[in-house]
Image (cartoon, rainbow, N blue to C red):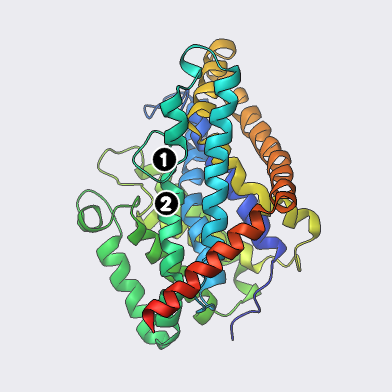
């Protein structure tokens, strides 16, 4: 029987941890390239691997919680979309007011920032794929619940064979479903759903999942040194790392998430939206190259500090944004619009 849908402290802590490493990986690319040779650079490479499979982790968590919901709705869709547009436009306006040189947007940049899902420099690739997945989610959930455990397991095997990427010697996943496509997000969503529906929680397997995570991650790290290895989002080893870590955290018993953990988790996604904004990202690079261009160790220090600062900044800013949205009626307007879209769709489909 599936667990009752509720915020669990262990999963929310995992969500926060995943966001930390995603932001760390993005900031790290300012200084560290792929040809890592020093011990410090190799350590950074290990942390980068965590950031890569953390993307799959986010989608896996969504599939785990949404697989039991077959009700069509646009509330979550428009909530994420409005937040994304807000940060894209707001940060652009800030740099228009205070930026200089290349960090001062033009008017056409401001116009483009209103379309963070389109083919512009302000595009948030993850958000666009994730929103598409949300539209498919109720249909995927209904389909998944109609399958027997055996059929569902067979579906996952087919998914991994067709959409997954093992290495350059087995490029089927490369041709049919790269890790940057919405189809891969739907695949990971269904795998998260399988864990929820057909893999009962067994606390005695906690150590097993941790050992699997360590072994798979070590293999991932070793093979990543070879050019023929594909370690992208749809790599089977990347997925196994995400699944094993998720299953390990699932066995940790912290009870329901406290208000503080819920607060951190609910605002963690803002860290991605802020850090990936075009001008904010350029600003980070400018500051880093100006003040932290001494050596590799200094770069690592700056990357860690910058990641923590971004997370704290995101938590504070997004908490204020949430209050402003409620006070100004933006949340209510978004809900009315999403309800209108749903009702219009129902009338059209009837």
Look at 79% across and 60% down and name the residue there: 258
Helix, strand, or loop for circle 2?
helix
Residue 296: give x, y in percent of width and height. 53, 19
Report the side of 111 relative to 78 (left or right): left
Which of disc 2 and disc 1 is earlier in sequence? 1
Residue bearing mark 2:
128
Residue bearing mark 1:
123
Between 94 and 219, the residue placed more toward the observer is 94
Look at 58% across and 14% down and name the residue there: 292
Residue 317: give x, y in percent of width and height. 70, 39
Q: Residue furthest right?
A: 259
Report the side of 143 relative to 297 (left or right): left
Residue 20: give x, y in percent of width and height. 60, 42
Between 109 and 177, the residue placed more toward the observer is 109
* Residue 132 visible in this rendered orientation of the protein: yes
Helix, strand, or loop for circle 1?
loop
Between 238 and 23, the residue placed more toward the observer is 23
Using the image, determine if residue 338 lies above or below residue 294: below
CA gap, disc 1 to disc 2?
8 Å
Using the image, determine if residue 91 lies above or below residue 98: below
Look at 53% across and 36% down and name the residue there: 89
Report the side of 57 relative to 170 (left or right): right
Instruction: Residue 93: give its label.
Output: none
* Residue 272 visible in this rendered orientation of the protein: no
Quadrant where the N terminus lies? bottom right
Are the residues at dot 1 and dot 2 in contact (C-beta closer than 8 Å)?
A: yes
Residue 86: give x, y in percent of width and height. 57, 42
Look at 41% across and 69% down and name the residue there: 136
Mark 1 neighbour density, 10 Å: few (under 14) some (14–19) many (20 or more) = many
Using the image, determine if residue 195 lies above or below residue 20: below
């Amino acid at each position: 029987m599936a667990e009752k849908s509720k915020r669990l402290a262990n999963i929310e802590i995992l969500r926060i941890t995943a966001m930390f490493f995603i932001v760390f990986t993005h900031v790290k690319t300012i200084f560290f390239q792929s040809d890592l040779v020093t011990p410090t650079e190799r350590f950074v490479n290990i942390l980068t691997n965590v950031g890569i499979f953390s993307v799959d982790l986010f989608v896996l968590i969504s599939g785990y919680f949404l697989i039991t919901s077959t009700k069509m709705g646009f509330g979550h869709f428009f909530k994420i979309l409005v937040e994304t547009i807000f940060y894209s436009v707001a940060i652009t306006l800030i740099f228009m007011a205070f930026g200089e040189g290349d960090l001062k947007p033009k008017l056409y940049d401001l116009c483009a920032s209103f379309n963070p899902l389109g083919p512009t420099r302000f595009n948030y690739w993850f958000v666009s794929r994730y929103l598409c997945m949300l539209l498919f989610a109720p249909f995927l959930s209904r389909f998944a619940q109609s399958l027997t455990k055996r059929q569902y397991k067979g579906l996952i095997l087919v998914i991994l064979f067709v959409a997954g990427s093992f290495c350059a010697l087995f490029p089927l996943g490369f041709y049919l479903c790269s890790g940057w496509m919405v189809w891969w997000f739907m695949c990971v969503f269904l795998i998260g759903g399988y864990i929820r529906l057909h893999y009962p929680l067994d606390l005695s397997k906690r150590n097993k999942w941790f050992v699997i995570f360590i072994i798979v991650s070590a293999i991932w790290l070793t093979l990543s040194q070879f050019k023929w290895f594909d370690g992208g989002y749809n790599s089977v080893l990347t997925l196994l790392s995400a699944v094993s870590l998720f299953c390990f955290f699932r066995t940790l018993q912290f009870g329901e998430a406290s208000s503080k953990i819920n607060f951190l988790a609910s605002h963690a996604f803002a860290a991605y939206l802020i850090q990936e904004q075009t001008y904010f990202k350029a600003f980070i690079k400018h500051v880093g190259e100006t003040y932290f261009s001494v050596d590799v160790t200094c770069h690592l220090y700056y990357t860690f500090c910058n990641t923590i600062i971004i997370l704290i900044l995101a938590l504070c800013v997004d908490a204020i944004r949430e209050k402003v949205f409620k006070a100004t009626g933006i949340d209510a307007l978004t809900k009315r619009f999403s309800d209108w879209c749903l009702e219009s769709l129902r009338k059209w489909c009837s």
